[in-house]
Image (cartoon, rainbow, N blue to C red):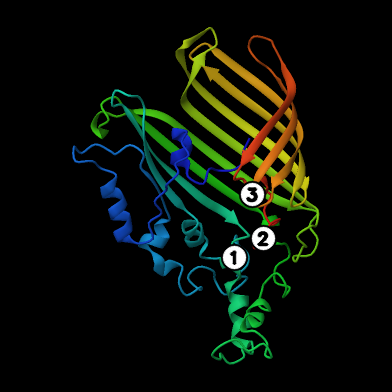
């Protein structure tokens, strides 16, 4: 299970992973994306996927100039600054999506919100020290061509890295973070927004904290430990009736999960404990408990392909049957399965 708030909650509640996502950076781009999402008949076009940052599109002045984003005093503490709400707003993204529900013209549409409530690993919190260092740095003159005998100008910039100048107590991946998300979808039998009915909605809250971390400039191959917490709530989902697969039942679920991961850049092991409450239809409520112990290994360094092996035990089903077994999965496009900082540049 992916223990994080979906980067695009609207896509998550629709259960889609679009190949092409529009990410407007200006008001004009956003307006164009919205117009393209409405057909000549006034109905939403199926397959629309928009993910945007309201601050970057409409309020860029809030994050330009540094001081508007992080106050001068204690600029690297996300909780003590007077401009906290500006930073949380700057870390907020909005997603919009539509998809076809069936071949008869029915469609689904959704919107979602993702907010970074706390993120001590936000690079913007360290602007003050970096800017001061750059002002004092001796930059060699820029010359035509490449002068191999002089110090490259990039070296002066690298010397101003908060990781190496003592400002940062932990690397970015290990800093505490807490993100929240919300997604709401609608179903339309005719494909029009005017006759839409509420469909799936979900809420997520996820946090992470690096443990037993050494110096901030932790080497790429160093051992890392990450503690993750996850709380999720999904309402009005649909699932096949256990007694009749042709019938769909309403499913409401709540999940709380804690996972401890230990590993390096090409492998890690994890221990996961979780509790779930699932209500099917109006009659059956299941209180589930699960324990998972496993490991993941990177198969292809360039393509982020992982092999996951895990032993899983689930108990608390209404039919009295417990599930215990071993699973093997392939994961594609998930860099280090959310174990940040183990890849150059992160």
**On screen, residue 166 above or below 15:** below
Q: Quadrant of the N terminus?
A: top right
Q: Residue furthest left?
A: 41
Residue behind mark 1: 123
Residue behind mark 2: 172
Cα gap from disc 3 to disc 2, whole angstroms: 16 Å
Residue 151 left/right relative to 47 = right
Residue 186 left/right relative to 317 = left
Residue 32 left/right relative to 317 = left
- Please rate how many residues cluster around mark 2, counting C-alpha atoms within 10 Å: few if below 14, some from 14 to 19, many from 20: many
Q: Nearer the viewer, residue 29 or 19?
A: 19
- Looking at the rendered structure, the secondary structure element under dot 1 is helix
- Looking at the rendered structure, the secondary structure element under dot 2 is helix
Q: Nearer the viewer, residue 279 or 171?
A: 171
2 and 1 marks in contact (CB < 8 Å)? yes
Q: Nearer the viewer, mark 3 or mark 1?
A: 3
Name which of mark 3 and mark 1 comes first in the sequence.
Answer: 1
**On screen, residue 190 above or below 72:** above
Name which of mark 3 and mark 2 comes first in the sequence.
Answer: 2
Cα gap from disc 2 to disc 1, whole angstroms: 8 Å
Q: Residue at x 58, y 92 (%)?
A: 141
Q: Position of residue 286 (x, y in %)?
A: 61, 17
Cα gap from disc 3 to disc 1, whole angstroms: 20 Å
Q: Position of residue 189 (x, y in %)?
A: 29, 24
Q: Quadrant of the C terminus?
A: bottom right
Name which of mark 2 and mark 1 comes first in the sequence.
Answer: 1
Residue behind mark 3: 335
Is any atom of residue 63 visible in this view? Answer: yes
Q: Position of residue 66 (x, y in %)?
A: 51, 73
């Amino acid at each position: 299970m992916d223990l994080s708030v979906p980067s695009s909650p609207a896509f998550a509640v629709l259960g889609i992973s679009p190949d092409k996502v529009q990410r407007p950076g200006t008001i004009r781009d956003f307006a164009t994306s919205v117009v393209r999402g409405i057909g000549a008949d006034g109905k939403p076009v199926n397959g629309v996927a928009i993910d945007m940052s309201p601050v970057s599109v409409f309020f860029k002045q809030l994050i330009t100039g540094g001081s508007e984003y992080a106050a001068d005093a204690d600029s690297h503490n996300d909780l003590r600054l007077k401009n906290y709400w500006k930073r949380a707003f700057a870390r907020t993204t909005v997603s919009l999506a539509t998809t076809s529900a069936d071949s008869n013209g029915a469609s689904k549409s959704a919107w979602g919100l993702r907010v970074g409530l706390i993120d001590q690993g936000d690079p913007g919190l360290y602007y003050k020290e970096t800017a001061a260092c750059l002002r004092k740095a001796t930059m060699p003159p820029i010359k035509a061509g490449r002068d191999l005998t002089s110090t490259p100008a990039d070296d002066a910039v690298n010397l101003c890295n908060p990781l190496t100048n003592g400002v940062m107590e932990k690397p970015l991946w290990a800093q505490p973070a807490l993100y929240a998300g919300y997604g709401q979808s609608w179903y339309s039998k005719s494909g029009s927004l005017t006759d839409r009915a509420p469909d799936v909605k979900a809420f997520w809250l996820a946090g992470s904290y690096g443990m037993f971390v050494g110096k901030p400039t932790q080497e790429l191959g160093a051992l890392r430990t990450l503690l993750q917490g996850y709380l999720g709530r999904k309402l009005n989902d649909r699932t096949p009736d256990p007694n009749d697969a042709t019938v769909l039942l309403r499913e409401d679920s709540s999940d709380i999960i804690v996972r401890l991961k230990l590993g390096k850049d090409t492998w890690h092991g994890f221990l996961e404990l979780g509790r779930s409450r699932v209500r099917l239809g109006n009659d059956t409520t299941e209180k589930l408990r699960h324990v998972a112990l496993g490991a993941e290994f990177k198969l292809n360094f360039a393509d982020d392909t992982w092999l996951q092996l895990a032993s899983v035990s689930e108990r608390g089903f209404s039919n009295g049957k417990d599930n215990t077994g071993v699973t093997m999965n392939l994961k594609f496009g998930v860099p280090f399965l959310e174990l940040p900082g183990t890849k150059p540049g992160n």
